[in-house]
Image (tube, rainbow, N blue to C red):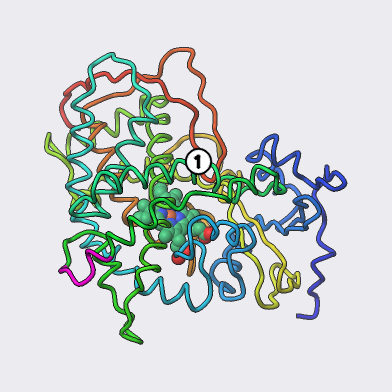
Amino acid sequence: MTDSRSAASVRTAPHRIPLLGHAMSLRRDPLEFMRSLRDHGDMTRIFVGTRPVHVVNSPELVRRVLVVEARKFDKGAMFDELRAHIGNGLVTSSGDFHRRQRRLAQPAYHPERISRYADHMSSRADQMSRSWRPGSTLDIGREVDRLVRANFFDALFEPAPPPETMAAIEQWLSVKHRAMRRALSPLPPSAARVLARRSDDEPHGRLRHLIAQRRGLADSGDLMSMLLLARDPRTGEHMSDAEVCDELLTLFVAGIGTVSAALSWTCHELARHPTVDERLGTELRSVLAGRLPTAADVAELHYTRRVLQEVLRLHPVWLLMRRVVAPVEVGGVELAPGDEVFFSPHALHRDPVLYPEPDRFDPDRWREERRAGLPRGAFLPFGAGNRLCVGEGFAWTEMTMVVATIMARWQLVPARRHKVRARVGTVVRPTTLVMYPVPRPRGAAR
Ligand code: HEM
């Protein structure tokens, strides 16, 4: 292109501090900071310490990075660091190896496969919600988190591994949670981050043992069978034991916190929007008529889907990143290998040009006629392109099963004077959600 310009010519966002760059703004209010960058154009430059990073702010440019020129990017420096914690699974790997692992992992997420897990999900949600008592105080975030973990391990392991293995995984996850938040933080490294890298590799031995025991056995219907049995159609190869172990560790960190955050936000939004909640209740009564949901209901629960879409619009991941591996032009700017690019689904999803009244919770904005004008790349809760979330179908099914099961029975009322804020980590979660369940009235279906 004749009119393209160099990366150095991109305008730097205001409030850069020598040596710290924009670290203070990122630390103070990362969501507001990412939103504010929109005001400086489709591409702007920030500094993480002394390191320059290009931030792209429009659906077109984000799509260019994620889809059109995807092969010219890998995931970047923070994922190199994350690899030290969770190995070289789908989230952290790149290039040919990532393509191969993706081919091998993909069949595990086939809709037919996922529909098998759906019944377990709704029956677990049913069990949990039957244990609630009208008017009792609930920490909804914690309830939902427990449920999502149980659902996930049901889907991953059939039969369940020995309790010591489960305990080691849970322990590892709680240690890794903090370490990952640091690894994926755009803030400059700290001593704590270096310390966090030194971790126990407790579950690895136990997982390898489990893998060795399960090798050669028939498909038991779980996700792990698929990882063990998958064959690369090009080479006929299976994943090695070490590769399966890395993929399992990757799934623990990618498939639990994300769903649990989305479901917690759903409870929060429904509790704050009684009209939406009532319409949801009406749909659930009419479609389910008192029975538990199954995978076949996902396509029929139209309003439930819109509610979840709106939750994912308002509360997506706040930051994703890439690193250039081959020269590439983005928005008229020439980027060179090593250059880093950030983008924020949160900022895109709150852009008033794309979404009028962007802070309003309005599931009807996802009606066919209203969403028609939305450009591609404007809604990215699961990313896009070759790194699109491999668990997207799983997540939709799980969210639908859980919401449909719980909300068919209960309305959630927030505790008075209980203030909820967004807590920004690798995902954005609500702070503690204190609520009272109230039995949903059994009115006639509309
Ligand atoms: C509401 C729930 C979820 C959300 C919002 C979510 C979001 C995302 C996003 C945005 C990415 C792309 C990251 C990037 O482009 O850098 C991603 C990738 C990924 N997700 Fe999810 N995810 C969810 C649930 C799940 C579940 C349930 C699983 C597993 C069962 C999962 C496994 C993965 C994996 C393995 C990747 C890496 C894919 C690759 O790079 O090839 N996710 N997820």
Left or right relative to 201: residue 186: right
Q: Nearer the viewer, residue 439 or 374?
A: 439
Determine if the magenta segment contains residue 219.
no
Disc 1 Cβ-to-ligand 1 distance below 8 Å: no
Q: Is residue 376 above or below residue 371?
A: below
| Residue 69 in picture, x, y percent from top left | 59, 74
Left or right relative to 398: residue 425: right
Q: Nearer the viewer, residue 32 or 280?
A: 32
Q: Quadrant of the C terminus?
A: top left
Q: Is residue 328 above or below residue 248?
A: below
Determine if the magenta segment contains residue 215.
yes
| Crowd rating for badge 1 (residues with CA inside 10 Å; few <14, some 14–19, many 20+) | many
Ligand 1 picture quarter? bottom left
For image coordinates 42% across by 62% down, the residue present is 246
For image coordinates 78% across by 50% down, the residue present is 49
| Residue 168 in picture, x, y percent from top left | 36, 46
Q: How many marks?
A: 1
**Residue 113 appears in the rendering:** yes
| Residue 323 in picture, x, y percent from top left | 65, 66
For image coordinates 79% across by 67% down, the residue present is 7
Q: Nearer the viewer, residue 379 or 218?
A: 218
Q: Which residue is mark 1?
A: 314
Task: Say which element carries label 1.
Answer: helix
**Residue 389 appears in the rendering:** no
| Residue 193 in picture, x, y percent from top left | 64, 46
Q: Nearer the viewer, residue 237 or 116?
A: 237
**In which quarter of the view is residue 144 placed?**
top left
| Magenta-highlighted residues | 212-218
